[in-house]
Image (spheres, rainbow, N blue to C red):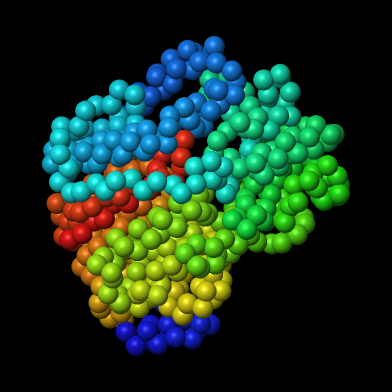
């Protein structure tokens, strides 16, 4: 215990020992074959929504391209905000009833069907735990702080069109439609998209529509913060160009956005990434700063966050604040007693852990993206927090070893609370197993923007009876309360917080 708690105090020293301990353990077990990884996979039914989508798509032909795009990106755009909230509340309830079914009757019902137009009705009619009313987003229009615009053939056939897709690659009916009318995108993002399109149309290089067909210019990401700063990242397929040639195109991009017509966007940062696959991390292909500031900063609940080009941050800053407040209340209910350790799994730039750091003894975050971990560490220092440490790597690799270290040092004394906020793929089975099998964790808050998907598998794994065959020996959790937070007005999605206790 002393070894680790002593390390919490000095800001510089605090990360190293836990890192070293966990890494040392990782080295010794990296070769150990885990025979249970298949439990991480689910066999989901074939997606019935595909048929519906095709039918719907064919029947959309009388609509303008703009309306088709609105229907695809912001399908609730014609409803009042109150109606949208009612619909989302009902949808979350249906998903949770499916969870109740799964917990009561096994895996016989299909949670994914809850998102289709003809869902299988859940057998359960009443939730065994409260679903609180959805928390509305404080901002409903132009709330997104990050947008990624694609490049492809427009309605007029011009391949240098910047916007969002209507149609699918699989059906070979993609049309790229300008996003100027979309309700969730801020004006400054739309301006960048228009300027990027103008730049592409002036450039001698072709856009990269299909990787194997050649072409260079790919999508553009725009990030903004509440203070009005703006970061732009242009993705570029190098194909067979040499560095000297690429340098020339980078210069014309900078010139366009700093001295040319694009100067109207008033960019604070311009990044460029040479990427020859759908998504490259910074380690695979570094984000190259061509102009301006290296980072963008956001403020949430009075805490400042540095965000790198590559790092995740909640897309709706106002709603994120409400989400984090609610997470705080759920992790530490009844006003929250001071103390204990908070595990912040899939922590991104550390927002959840850092905003909760004054209320706990210690925060340990785990995050896959190296740049985000560096941001999280920087953010802890920026906010003068002394009790946060962030570990890089896959949660499924780092957490099981961390649990052993906490056990062996006796440092897991006192309440250990976990908050998990994975990507749509959900948590790996080994993460669930490490949580289930650690008796000190009595409370877990699961945040998901797609609870009907892979998260449902995690819910089942958290709540099923102990199963020695699956090495799930720890006591089962049960859901005790759920709260939806509307992070994405005009879309069917929201964030769902589910508290599990045992
Ligand atoms: C939905 S974001 C949540 C970030 C953070 N909780 C927040 O509110 O800003 C999911 C995060 O999980 C990270 N991630 C994805 N797979 C992971 C894994 N296997 N292990 C650890 N982190 C992972 C992503 O890089 C991303 O930062």
Asked if residue 364 shows in the view, the reply is yes
- Residue 150 occupies quadrant: top right
Q: Residue 304 in the image: x percent, y percent?
A: 54, 67
Q: Is residue 94 above or below residue 39?
A: above
Give the side of residue 159 with respect to residue 101, left or right: right
- Residue 195 occupies quadrant: top right
Q: Nearer the viewer, residue 47 or 239?
A: 47
Q: Nearer the viewer, residue 473 or 125?
A: 125
Q: What residue sits 53% from the left and 58% below the top? A: 369
Q: What residue sits 75% from the left and 47% below the top? A: 265
Q: Residue 325 in the image: x percent, y percent?
A: 38, 61
Q: What residue sits 72% from the left and 56% below the top? A: 268
Q: Residue 348 in the image: x percent, y percent?
A: 49, 59
Q: Residue 495 in the image: x percent, y percent?
A: 38, 47
Asked if residue 20 shows in the view, the reply is no
Q: Nearer the viewer, residue 6 or 244?
A: 6
**Quadrant location, the C terminus:** bottom left
Q: What residue sits 40% from the left and 59% below the top? A: 324
Q: Nearer the viewer, residue 261 or 269?
A: 261
Q: Is residue 118 above or below residue 421?
A: above
Q: Is residue 366 above or below residue 229?
A: below
């Amino acid at each position: 215990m002393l070894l680790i708690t002593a390390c919490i105090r000095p800001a510089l020293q605090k990360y190293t020992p836990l890192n070293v301990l966990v890494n040392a353990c990782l080295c010794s077990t990296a070769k150990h074959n885990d025979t249970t990884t298949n439990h991480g996979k689910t066999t989901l039914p074939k997606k019935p929504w595909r048929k519906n989508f095709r039918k719907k798509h064919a029947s959309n032909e009388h609509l303008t391209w703009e309306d088709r795009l609105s229907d695809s990106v912001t399908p609730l755009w014609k409803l009042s905000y109150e109606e949208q909230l009612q619909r989302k509340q009902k949808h979350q309830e249906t998903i949770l009833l499916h969870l109740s079914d799964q917990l009561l009757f096994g895996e016989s019902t299909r949670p994914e069907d809850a998102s289709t137009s003809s869902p299988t009705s859940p057998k359960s009619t009443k939730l065994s735990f409260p679903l609180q009313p959805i928390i509305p987003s404080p901002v409903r229009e132009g709330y997104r702080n990050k947008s990624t615009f694609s490049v492809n053939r427009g309605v007029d056939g011009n391949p240098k069109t910047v916007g969002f897709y209507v149609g699918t690659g699989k059906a070979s009916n993609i049309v790229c439609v300008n996003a100027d009318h979309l309700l969730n995108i801020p004006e400054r993002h739309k301006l960048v998209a228009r300027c990027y399109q103008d730049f592409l149309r002036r450039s001698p290089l072709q856009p990269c529509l299909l990787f194997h067909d050649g072409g260079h210019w790919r999508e553009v990401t725009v990030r903004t913060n509440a203070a009005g700063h703006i970061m732009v990242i242009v993705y570029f397929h190098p194909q067979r160009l040499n560095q000297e040639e690429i340098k020339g195109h980078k210069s014309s991009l900078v010139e366009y956005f700093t001295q040319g017509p694009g100067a109207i966007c008033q960019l604070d940062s311009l990044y460029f990434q040479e990427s020859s696959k759908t998504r490259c991390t910074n380690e695979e292909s570094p984000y190259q700063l061509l102009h301006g500031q290296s980072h963008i900063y956001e403020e949430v609940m009075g805490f400042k966050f540095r965000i790198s080009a590559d790092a995740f941050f909640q897309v709706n800053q106002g709603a994120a604040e409400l989400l984090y407040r609610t997470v705080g209340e759920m992790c530490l209910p009844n006003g929250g007693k001071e103390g204990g350790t908070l595990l912040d799994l899939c922590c991104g730039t550390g927002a959840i852990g850092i905003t909760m750091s004054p209320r706990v003894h210690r925060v340990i975050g785990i995050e896959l993206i190296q740049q985000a971990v560096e941001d999280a560490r920087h953010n802890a220092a920026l906010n003068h927090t002394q009790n946060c440490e962030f570990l890089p790597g896959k949660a499924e690799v780092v957490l099981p070893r961390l649990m052993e270290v906490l056990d062996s040092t006796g440092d897991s004394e006192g309440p250990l609370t976990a908050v998990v906020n994975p990507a749509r793929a959900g948590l790996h089975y080994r993460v669930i197993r490490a949580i289930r099998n650690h008796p000190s964790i009595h409370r877990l808050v699961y945040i998901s923007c797609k609870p009907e998907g892979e998260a449902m598998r995690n819910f089942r794994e958290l709540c099923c009876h102990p199963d020695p065959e699956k090495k799930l020996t720890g006591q089962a959790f049960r859901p005790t309360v759920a709260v939806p937070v509307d992070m994405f007005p005009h879309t069917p999605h929201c964030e769902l917080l589910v508290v599990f206790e045992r």
